[in-house]
Image (cartoon, rainbow, N blue to C red):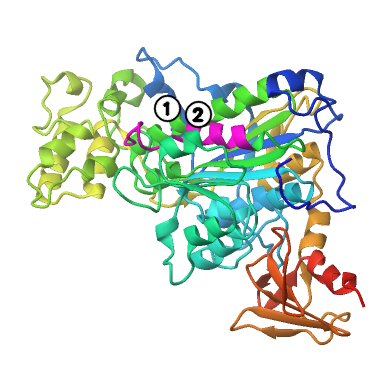
């Protein structure tokens, strides 16, 4: 395993390890001692906001012929659907959705890593750490965004980015690749400075990431447009400068798989959701295809390793996207070519709008980048032959509106009208979502078949990897507020600190951190954090044990 402090607990037994430690994966896995019904490694991938129509469109765009008969790699591993409701309603946001996948518990709107009663619940990542497994998070959004944060933070409001970032940095995650340093001001919390102080190798470019061999790696990438809060959509990305989701996934696996105890990795295709919010069909397709490539990277390792489970599951629907809209009255005779305009785009709406100059005089360039003829459409146009004069008139009116008032909203309307793509909303939707699973035969022959609740995904992962989420919660989150064993507990809610005294021993610990003071001497809690949730202070049992373990 990595050179780090042990985090094992007696009540959480370790899973099987390779017999031939130090051999390359290809050699070692051949002689691995497989534990029945247990996997050594887990890779969880979340295509945020990916509705079923997204994969359908992605297949058409992937096709060399117009009929779109090609398959995505994930298609073969489809096992069923997951219900997505949160505790209070049918349409969830990413925080309770991520919490369900991470902890196996329903949660509240905007809440991370806590249940519906506002009690912290251990995540799969935290339970894996307790078994000395390596852990990692990969995302194309800022790292403290809802889905990755649900695995490593416990906070009532997902928008409290500084709090979430501080918790995640103190969790001792081995590999974290994404963006986000600019999301929080250094005055509130110095993300990169803290990361370096905690021993991370911080990389900011694709080249730095590829050459990194550190056991603790923090990737903070800037996108094509100079933003430090998210990565580019895949079609907008400059490949030589910015890593793809698949490349980050492969790098994380490369580093995490060194750990002889195994690893847990969560990968999020974050911006499928962002594109759906914007009704940007090109962006949805772009990052659905990029997610498929990330799944391929995970699958390639898992098949070679023989002791790894790969799960991909959408967290919620988004936008009500459909192939066909109200203007496609002849839907039953519409040819495949109605979707051809989508293939002409070289950039997403975000990427195309980034080309707009300050005087807004180059709208034609923006339109062309998004696959739209700036001069409009007539029945004589090849790209228009399968469309009615009525629809052409609507498209042309939208082109004129964009030229008069260029905006992302006006741009996506043109493409969606042109390709007959429908949307019901710019928000999330409440339908069941697809689940995909690859599992070695010794782990499960019928993984997650049929319709499941989203909490069952976490339960399946825990069961197949030997993780005990309830035991981990008991170990990591002891409520010392009004605890009978610690009647003298002093909680300063404004300073977010706890002071406990037992005989002549005094423990001081600050919420969101994994360091404590025993009689004013610093002590590491090895990545186990204290949290203040709903005005109640929770600390790891290991912190309380320090009071008992000090010499008299």
x then y, percent, for residue 490: 73, 86
119 vs 189, left or right, is right
Is 516 or 166 nearer to us in this picture?
A: 516
Is 236 or 322 nearer to us in this picture?
A: 236
x then y, percent, for residue 116: 68, 64
Q: Nearer the viewer, mark 2 or mark 1?
A: 2
The residue at 44%/57% (across/down) is 181
Q: Which residue is mark 1?
A: 58
x then y, percent, for residue 515: 68, 67
Q: Which residue is mark 2?
A: 292
Up the image or down, 357 lies above or below 501; here it is above
At label 2, counting other C-alpha atoms closer than 10 Å, the crowd grade (few under 14, some 14-19, many 20 or more) is many
x then y, percent, for residue 206: 42, 37
Up the image or down, 289 lies above or below 165; here it is above
- Residue 315 in view in this figure: no
Query: Which range is magenta?
Result: 235-255
249 vs 241, left or right, is right
**Quarter of the image that includes the N terminus:** top right
Residue 238 is inside the magenta segment:
yes
316 vs 426, left or right, is right
Q: CA distance from mark 2 to mark 1?
A: 9 Å
Mark 2 vs 1: CB contact within 8 A: yes
Identify the mark at residue 251; answer none if there is no mark: none
């Amino acid at each position: 395993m990595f050179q780090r402090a042990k985090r094992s607990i007696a009540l959480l037994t370790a899973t099987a390890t390779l017999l031939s430690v130090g051999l390359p994966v290809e050699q070692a896995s051949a002689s691995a001692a497989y534990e029945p019904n247990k996997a050594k490694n887990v890779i969880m991938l979340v295509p945020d906001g990916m509705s079923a129509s997204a994969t359908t469109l992605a297949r058409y765009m992937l096709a060399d012929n117009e009929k779109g008969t090609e398959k995505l790699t994930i298609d073969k591993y489809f096992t069923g659907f997951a219900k997505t409701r949160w505790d209070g309603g049918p349409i969830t946001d990413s925080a309770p959705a991520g919490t369900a996948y991470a902890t196996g518990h329903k949660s509240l709107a905007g809440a991370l890593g806590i249940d519906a009663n506002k009690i912290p619940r251990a995540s799969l990542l935290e339970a894996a750490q307790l078994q000395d497994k390596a852990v990692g998070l990969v995302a194309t959004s800022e790292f403290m965004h809802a889905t990755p944060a649900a695995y490593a933070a416990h906070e009532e409001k997902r928008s409290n980015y500084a709090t979430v970032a501080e918790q995640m940095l103190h969790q001792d995650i081995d590999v974290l690749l994404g963006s986000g340093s600019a999301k929080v001001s250094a005055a509130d919390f110095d993300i990169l400075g803290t990361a370096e102080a905690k021993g991370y190798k911080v990389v900011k470019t694709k080249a730095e990431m590829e050459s990194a061999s550190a056991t603790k790696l923090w990737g903070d990438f800037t996108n094509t447009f100079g933003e430090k809060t998210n990565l580019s959509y895949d079609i907008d990305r400059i490949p030589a400068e910015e890593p793809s989701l698949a490349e980050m996934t492969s790098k994380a696996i490369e580093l995490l798989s060194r750990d002889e105890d195994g690893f847990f990795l969560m990968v999020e295709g974050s911006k499928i959701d962002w594109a759906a919010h914007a009704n940007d069909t090109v962006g949805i397709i772009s990052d659905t295809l990029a997610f498929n490539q990330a799944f391929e990277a995970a699958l390639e390792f898992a098949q070679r390793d023989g002791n790894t489970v790969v799960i991909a599951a959408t967290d919620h629907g988004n936008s009500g996207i459909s192939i066909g809209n109200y203007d496609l009255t002849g839907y039953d005779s519409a040819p495949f070519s109605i979707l051809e305009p989508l293939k002409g785009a070289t950039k997403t709406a975000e990427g195309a709008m980034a080309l707009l100059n300050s005087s807004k005089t180059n709208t034609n360039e923006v339109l062309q980048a998004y696959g739209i003829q700036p001069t409009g459409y007539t029945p004589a146009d090849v790209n228009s032959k399968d469309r009615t004069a009525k629809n052409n008139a609507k498209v042309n009116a939208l082109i004129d509106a964009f030229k008069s008032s260029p905006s992302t909203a006006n741009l996506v309307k043109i493409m969606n009208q042109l390709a007959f793509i429908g949307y019901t909303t710019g928000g999330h939707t409440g339908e069941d979502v697809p689940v995909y699973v690859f599992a070695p035969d010794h782990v499960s022959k019928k993984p997650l078949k049929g319709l499941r609740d989203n909490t069952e995904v976490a339960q399946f992962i825990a069961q197949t990897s030997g993780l005990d989420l309830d035991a981990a919660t008991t170990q990591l989150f002891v409520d010392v507020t009004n605890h009978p064993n610690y009647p003298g507990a002093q909680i300063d809610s404004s300073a977010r600190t706890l002071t406990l005294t037992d005989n002549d021993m005094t423990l001081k610990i600050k919420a969101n951190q994994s360091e404590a003071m025993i009689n004013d001497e610093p002590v590491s809690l090895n990545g186990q954090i204290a949290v203040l949730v709903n005005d109640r202070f929770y600390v790891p049992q290991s912190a309380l044990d320090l009071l008992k373990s000090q010499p008299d």
